[in-house]
């Protein structure tokens, strides 16, 4: 009964917060916020043990720099989401993924996405998680 209530409540929130990018929107270079946030529930994500609120509302940011050609750094604004970003380079066909680290610094945070137009989605990954709104973004990597 409680699980059903939580599901209905999150579905209502999803309808309120759905953000759809416009058809004519062009990706841009530099720091680009995903056009829709990741919204959902995350309890006991892999590698992340914390007492934070299980409600996730986070915007993923893709950052590019001309001094790092063909690479992207992924960051987040908002709550820690334990998210995985899956990306595709529309110009080369290359694909890849990046999982949000659990509070540890990565040796090389720049991910090789290749030069070109990138589209990506972000979902919450955890032992018990529910992604209500999938984060979506697009940008250009110099």
Image: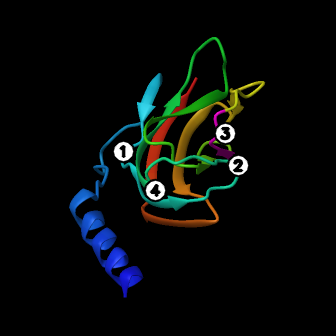
Q: Nearer the viewer, mark 3 or mark 1?
A: 3
Q: Which mark sits nearer the N-terminus, 3 or 1?
A: 1
Q: Mark 4 to mark 2: distance in Å? A: 15 Å
Q: Secondary structure at mark 1?
A: loop
Q: Mark 4 to mark 3: distance in Å? A: 17 Å
- Between residue 48 and residue 10, name the one nearer to us: 48
Q: Which residues are magenta?
A: 97-103
Q: Mark 2 to mark 3: distance in Å? A: 8 Å
Q: Residue at x 69, y 26 (%)?
A: 110
Q: Position of residue 2 (x, y in %)?
A: 37, 81
Disc 2 target residue: 47
Asked whether disc 4 touches disc 1, contact meaning CB atoms under 8 Å apart, the reply is no
Q: Nearer the viewer, mark 4 or mark 1?
A: 4
Q: Residue at x 68, y 33 (%)?
A: 114
Q: Residues within 10 Å of mark 3 (few under 14, many from 20)?
A: some
Q: Residue at x 32, y 80 (%)?
A: 5
Q: Residues within 10 Å of mark 2 (few under 14, many from 20)?
A: few
Q: Position of residue 69 (x, y in %)?
A: 66, 20
Asked whether disc 2 touches disc 1, contact meaning CB atoms under 8 Å apart, the reply is no
Residue 17 inside the magenta-drawn segment: no
Q: Position of residue 14 (x, y in %)?
A: 30, 64
Disc 3 target residue: 101
* Left or right of 132, for residue 44: right
Rendered-image quadrant of the C terminus: top right
Disc 4 target residue: 54
Q: Secondary structure at mark 2?
A: loop
Q: Is residue 74 above or below residue 19?
A: above
Which image quadrant is residue 72 in?
Answer: top right
């Amino acid at each position: 009964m409680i699980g059903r209530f939580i599901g209905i409540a999150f579905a209502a929130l999803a309808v309120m917060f759905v953000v759809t990018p416009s058809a004519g929107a062009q990706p841009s270079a530099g720091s680009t916020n995903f056009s829709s946030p990741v919204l959902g529930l995350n309890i006991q994500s892999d590698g992340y043990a914390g007492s934070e609120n299980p409600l996730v509302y986070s915007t993923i940011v893709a950052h590019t720099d001309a001094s790092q050609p063909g690479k992207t750094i992924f960051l987040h604004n908002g709550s820690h989401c334990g998210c995985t970003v899956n990306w595709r380079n529309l110009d080369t066909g290359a694909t890849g993924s990046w999982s949000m680290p659990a509070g540890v610094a990565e040796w090389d945070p720049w991910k090789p996405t290749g030069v070109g137009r990138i589209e990506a989605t972000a979902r919450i990954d955890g032992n018990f998680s529910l992604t209500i709104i999938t984060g979506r973004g697009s940008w250009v990597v110099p």
